[in-house]
Amino acid sequence: MHHLPYRGRNNLMQVSDFEHCKHTSANWFLRTAGRSTTYMARLIWFTSGHFPHSAFHEHFNFEGNQRCGVDVETRDHIWFDCDLWIKKHKPPNAEIERMHRGERGVHAALDLLPPTPPGMSLLEHFLQDWRETPIALDDVTEFLRLNPIVGTFTWLELVDQALGDWAHGKDDSLVLLKVDLHTGDLTEFVQSYALVGTHAVTDTFEFDNAGVTVLQAEFGLAAAKAKNR
């Protein structure tokens, strides 16, 4: 892990995080993912940068391209900028407003932000500094839990189907409802996100028991828990 060619240039892990990669039960990834192979895969994909997004496809000349409102979608775009996904790892709105007004605060002399470079606004400088702050792996796990479909092939298929339904005037289709729920502001449903999303779908569309289990898994409920409900 100490060798850049091994861990890759797009790996989120810092040197201080390498202790998480152990071959024992102390392995952070194993403890975090539990027995969910799906969640383990998503953790590894997102942390290493090897998941289906535009920049990855472009780098390896893969066919297909995740649709988003940018020329080339990157993990940084998903993490910092994309408005589709639920995020808690962002600067407080009050801080953003203060910076937007050009205020360094009452205790400006104590601010950790260095002098703003020429030609850059205080807000731009603040956001640049925030983006360069090392990403905490615990924040990654929360982001993936709140957005169980981000960076997956399932999301690509949903988007393609939703665009097709929209083009044919099917604005009340199951796929469009799923897309709305997956990218909606459901932050308040931290623990019950999967159940809330599932209920929102089944209140409108009929599913058998097996279909409900699959739907719960799509919204992030572990398979074992899904079977027990």
Image (spheres, rainbow, N blue to C red):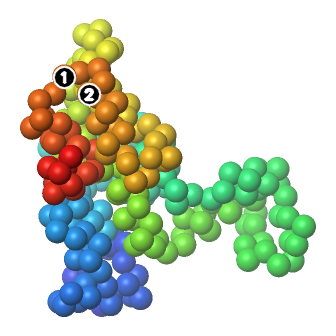
Q: Secondary structure at mark 2?
A: helix
Residue receiving disc 1:
206
Which percent across, then down, holds residue 197? Answer: 34, 37
In screen coordinates, is 225 left or right of 17? left
- Camera sees residue 203: yes
Q: How many residues crowd mark 2 within 10 Å: few (<14), some (14–19), many (20+)? A: some
Can you name the residue that lies furthest to the front here?
228
Tag shown at residue 189: none
In this rendering, the answer to whether 107 lies above or below 229 is below
In screen coordinates, is 128 left or right of 45? right
In this rendering, the answer to whether 204 lies above or below 99 is above
Quarter of the image for residue 25 reads: bottom left
Q: Amino acid at mark 2?
A: Thr
Residue receiving disc 2:
202
Q: Which quadrant of the figure contains the N terminus?
A: bottom left
Quarter of the image for residue 209 reads: top left
Q: Secondary structure at mark 1?
A: loop
Q: CA distance from mark 2 to mark 1?
A: 6 Å
